[in-house]
Image (cartoon, grey):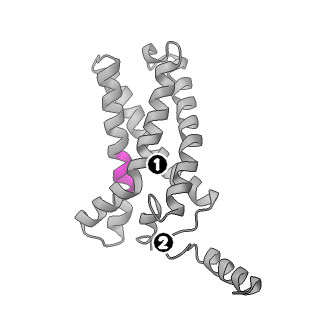
């Protein structure tokens, strides 16, 4: 294939968001969008888990575990809702959500909770203290920065969030 034909083929694939038939092109823009989607679910779960754990008077470990469980729950739920809207049965939609989001959420949660764990006094900050919100926001930003290249890598291999794109209408 000559260079002109090859370039034309690449432009055609980019215009249609496809790369080797696997799904969306592994652009930084696509990775950012996938990571923002993941971040939304993780942030909702994290904040809700921290608020509930604090309201129940739980210690750091059970509160963190609840926050992680809820981060996965909301992360999967947001994807599941979109795939179900495309008319897919629940079992298939659930499998798509697991395939699309598990690595992304796991990396995000590892970074997010790791930052909170090592940030001095962040684990003991209450909801009324600025340190709680500042450390949580900073940890989510760092988790986003670390998770975006992970999502770009998985999308480029037709995995992760790329699996969801075939169900978008």
Residue in the image at 35% along x and 43% along y: 72
User: x, y (%) of residue 127?
Assistant: 44, 20
* Picture layout, residue 21 above or below residue 128: below
Q: Are marks 1 and 2 in contact (CB under 8 Å)?
A: no
Write down the residue under mark 1.
38
User: x, y (%) of residue 143?
Assistant: 53, 38
Look at the numbered disc 1 and give the secondary structure of its residue: helix
Write down the residue under mark 2.
22
* Picture layout, residue 70 above or below residue 37: above
Residue in the image at 56% along x and 72% along y: 19
Task: Report whether residue 41 is seen.
Answer: no
Give the crowd class for mark 1: few <14, some 14-19, many >=20 residues within 10 Å.
many
Q: Is residue 129 left or right of residue 76?
A: right
The single residue placed furthest to the front in the displayed view is 1
Using the image as rendered, state which of residue 3 and residue 45 is in the foreground: 3
**Can residue 113 be found in the magenta stretch?**
no
- Could you tell me how far apart the alpha carbons at marks 1 and 2 are, in whole angstroms? 20 Å
Q: Which residues are magenta?
A: 74-79
The quadrant in which residue 67 appears is top left
Task: Report whether residue 55 is seen.
Answer: yes
* Picture layout, residue 27 above or below residue 60: below
Q: Which image quadrant: the N terminus?
A: bottom right
User: x, y (%) of residue 18?
Assistant: 55, 74
* Picture layout, residue 89 above or below residue 137: below
Q: Is residue 4 left or right of residue 79?
A: right
> Which numbered disc, 1 or 2, marks the residue that appears first in the sequence?
2
């Amino acid at each position: 294939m000559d260079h002109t034909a090859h370039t034309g083929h690449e432009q055609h694939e980019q215009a249609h968001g496809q790369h080797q038939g696997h799904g969306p092109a592994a652009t930084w823009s696509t990775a950012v969008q996938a990571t923002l989607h993941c971040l939304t679910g993780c942030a909702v779960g994290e904040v809700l888990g921290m608020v509930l754990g604090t309201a129940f008077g739980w210690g750091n470990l059970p509160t963190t575990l609840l926050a992680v469980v809820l981060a996965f729950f909301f992360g999967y739920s947001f994807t599941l809702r979109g795939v179900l809207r495309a008319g897919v049965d629940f079992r298939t939609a659930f499998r798509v959500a697991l395939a699309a989001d598990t690595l992304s959420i796991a990396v995000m949660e590892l970074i997010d909770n790791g930052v909170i764990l090592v940030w001095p006094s962040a684990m003991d900050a209450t909801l009324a203290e600025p340190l709680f919100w500042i450390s949580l926001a900073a940890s989510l930003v760092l988790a986003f920065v670390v998770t975006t290249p992970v999502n770009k890598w998985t999308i480029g291999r037709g995995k992760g969030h790329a699996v969801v794109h075939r169900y978008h209408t």
